[in-house]
Amino acid sequence: MAEEALLEQAKLLIEFCRRKHFRIAAAESCTGGLVAATLTEIPGSSDVIERGFVTYSNDAKQAMLGVPAATLATTVQ
């Protein structure tokens, strides 16, 4: 998705969450923070975005997010 289209989708999501009084929390790994970076490009997004985590290592996923080791050991075929 082109950057402009991605930002437009982020804007729509922020507006939707604002109308519904939803908050956004994200846990990212392979995206390396792209979700949070895109959402925070939208002016005023801080009234909707609660928090974000970039946890790339399995140790961080377990310690910070409580992801079970068994889940991380699962391979998708």
Image (spheres, rainbow, N blue to C red):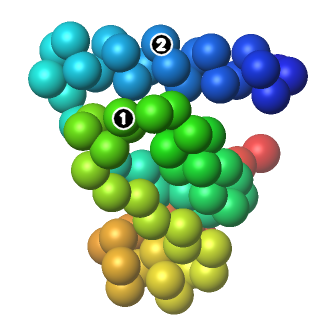
Q: Residues within 10 Å of mark 1 (few under 14, many from 20)?
A: few
- Say if 38 sits above or below 31 in the image: above
The amino acid type of the residue labelled 2 equals Leu
Residue 21, given in percent of the width and then of the height, sits at 14, 23
Find the residue positioned furthest to the left.
21
* Quadrant of residue 30 within the rendered picture: bottom right
Find the residue positioned furthest to the right.
2
Q: Is the residue under label 1 in contact with that under label 2 (CB below 8 Å)?
A: no
Residue 11, given in percent of the width and then of the height, sits at 50, 20
Q: Quadrant of the C terminus?
A: top right
User: Is 77 or 51 nearer to us in this picture?
Assistant: 51
Left or right: residue 22 compared with residue 36 = left
Query: Regarding mark 2 in the picture, which secondary structure is present there?
Result: helix
Residue 66, given in percent of the width and then of the height, sits at 31, 73
- Say if 48 sits above or below 14 in the image: below
Left or right: residue 22 compared with residue 27 = left
Q: Give the number of the mark in front: 2 or 1.
A: 1
The amino acid type of the residue labelled 1 equals Gly
Q: Which residue is mark 2?
A: 12
Q: Residue at x 60, y 49 (%)?
A: 37
Question: Of label 2 and label 1, which has the lower sequence position?
Answer: 2
Label 2, label 1: how many angstroms apart (C-alpha)?
13 Å
Residue 76, given in percent of the width and then of the height, sits at 70, 49
Q: Residue at x 63, y 73 (%)?
A: 56
Q: Which residue is mark 1?
A: 44
Q: Residue at x 39, y 24 (%)?
A: 14
Q: Is residue 46 visible?
A: yes
User: Is 75 or 28 nearer to us in this picture?
Assistant: 28
Q: Residue at x 62, y 81 (%)?
A: 57
